[in-house]
Amino acid sequence: DIQMTQSPPSLSASLGDRVTVTCRASQSIDTFVNWYQQRPGEAPKLLIYLSSRLQSGVPSRFSGGGSGTDFTLTITNLQPEDFATYYCQQSYMTPYMFGRGTNLEIK
Amino acid sequence: QLQLRQSGPGRVRPSETLSLTCSPSGFSVTTGNYYWTWVRQSPGKGLEWIGHISHTGSTNYNPSLKSRVSLFVDTSKNQLSLRLTSVTAADTAIYYCARDSGLGGAWFDPWGQGALVTVS
């Protein structure tokens, strides 16, 4: 299985800040990484697919990048609704695996 | 707009079989080359991909559950279903269904509201 190591597990930031979450795959996976946001009590929501493609309806302050084994999700100009948990997911091969999540909290 | 509505028992006794359904509205399960994926979420194991199924019935399961899980698609009812046999406390989780973009990317959007299943 391809493991996804996500960091940091938690992150504190202020409104208007820029933050970056990283995921490292246990082997090269080209650009087959997707990112999700999950608010408490809700289902995950797709933000970014294929490493850098912004899902329709997602604000442009979200961006993704990377290829091979190292990937990033960056959020600029943090808004109140952005404080949530973020997950990466590899879709290079089954079984599709998720990172353990990054809990973004208000400082 | 596609929405996925899930239903399930809430509680299942150990060693019994868990059955869940997922009903897309505003979208036919036979449209396009999508797959339909199931994911579960528990505090101890995070998000775990269970498997996916195409509208033709082609399946792929997580090896960790392969011996106990079955996915089905009923095109006449426009409904998806999951069956997990011989459940234990470790199967306690929120179970989600989602539309899967299919081979060549496998991103999941949208997701159902989730069904909490407690094994006790």
Image: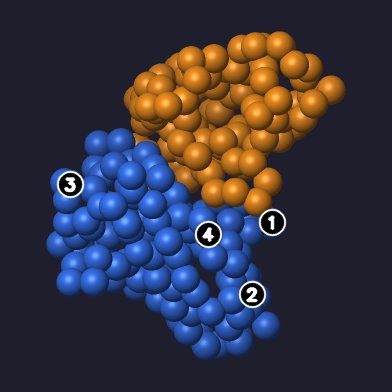
- Measure the alpha-carbon separation of dots 1 and 4: 15 Å
Question: Which quadrant would the C terminus of chain A be assigned to in this image?
Answer: top right
User: Which color was chain B given?
Assistant: blue
Name the residue that disc number 4 marks: B114
How are the colours assigned in the image?
Answer: by chain
Secondary structure of the residue carrying tag 2 is: strand
Q: Position of residue A7 (x, y in %)?
A: 66, 29
Find disc 1 in the rendering and name its residue: B43
Helix, strand or loop at mark 3: loop
Mark 4 residue element: loop
How far apart marks 4 and 3 lie (CA) works out to: 24 Å
Residue A84, percent from left and from top: 67, 35
Residue shown at 65% from the left, 37% from the top:
A85
Question: Is residue B68 in view from this perspective?
Answer: no
Q: Is there one chain holding both mark 1 and mark 4?
A: yes
Name the kind of residue labelled 4 in the image: Gly
Q: Amino acid at mark 1?
A: Pro
N-term mark: 2 or 3: 3
